Image (tube, rainbow, N blue to C red):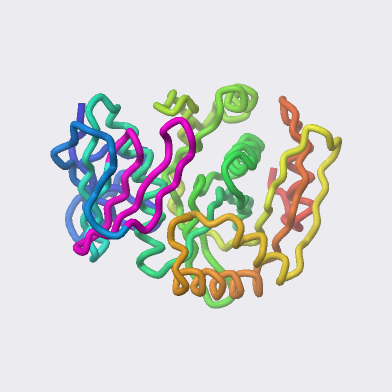
Amino acid sequence: MKDLAQVYNLYGLRVYSEVGLHSPIAQSALPPYDIEVRWGKGKTGSDCVSAGEILAKIDLGNGRGYTVTDTGTGYIYCSHQMCEFWIDYNLHSVYVHLFDGVCSEIAGLLLEGNIIASILTLAGECVLHASAVMIGSSALAFVGGPGMGKSTLAALLCANGGRFITDDLLRLQANGTGFCCFPGTGQIRLHKDIAESLAEGLSAVVSSETLPDGRIGVKIDDDSSMPPLAGIVIPYPSHDCKELKLERLSRSMTILYLMAFPRVQWLQERKYLQRRLDFFGRLTASIPIFKAEIPWCLPFSRELAHSLLRGVGITSTF
């Protein structure tokens, strides 16, 4: 069943959407809106064949993946076997065409992540593939690819007194001396075993639900503040190491690491790569960035959270 339209606050944007989102609802539903999302007519097939120039075709196996096409009037982002997002060249209007038999909630999950990230990147911004938590008055972000523990470590810090900012997509704004973090959806998506292991620490401030992709969506109290970014950790989970190992990266190494984990993989044209390089250069000039080998064994100890904060030089408030 499709949802009634709402206006959401999402990564600093006002998003009018007929597609239900797991995001804070705006206090006012009046225009203007940064992005307007409406349901299209749907599709009976799922072949993702659209006329135009194919910008990317990503195969993730088992029929999963996506194709991005420039149609001459806009972009079509097709999530294979799921749905299509038709985005106009002004990056303001999005029509969602759901394939037959697909749960409508899938469209909301994709919209909050890949589609908004693509729109922001096409608009000239550089977003990080990151989750972030506020400690005291500043933020710590975890950057990396899928399965590297970004969401888990953010949830671990929240379970030990941190305040959640965003999961999987971090939009930053320069503030003169550094960067501030825009709040995201208010929901962390975790695998079931990890959600269960952290449930006690999170139980006072969250509700949870099982999402269509099988993960647990953990809803945390909304926080509309924009804390300054104090540090970035690139985590490498390890079942073999016994204690946390942190290494602060040089600026040149940091840029190489960050370039390896783009939030939007399909935008590889020179101008987008140059923007990314310029952005990472500014970011590393003011923000310390660390590589971390993380002991990965459930249940996570409270000491791991404290060790992370001590290692990156952030004073714990819990």
- Where does the image place residue 169, in percent across and percent down from the top left? 48, 51
Q: Is residue 68 within the magenta segment? A: yes
- Where does the image place residue 197, in percent across and percent down from the top left? 64, 24
Snapshot quadrant of residue 248: bottom right
Q: Return the residue nearer the eye: 68 or 178.
A: 68
Q: Return the residue nearer the eye: 145 or 3.
A: 145
> On the rendered image, what quadrant is the N terminus found in?
top left
Q: Is residue 128 within the magenta segment? A: no
- Where does the image place residue 265, in percent across and percent down from the top left? 48, 55
- Where does the image place residue 50, in percent across and percent down from the top left? 24, 49
Residue at 35 percent across and 67 percent down: it is: 123
173 lies left or right of 122: right
167 lies left or right of 284: left
Snapshot quadrant of residue 120: bottom left
Q: Point out the residue furthest to the right here.
A: 242
Q: Is residue 143 above or below residue 259?
A: above
In the image, the segment drawn in magenta is 54-83
Q: Is residue 79 above or below residue 288?
A: above
141 lies left or right of 183: right
Q: Return the residue nearer the eye: 298 or 96.
A: 96
Taking the image as drawn, is residue 34 in sight? no
180 lies left or right of 148: left
Majority SS type along the magenta span: strand
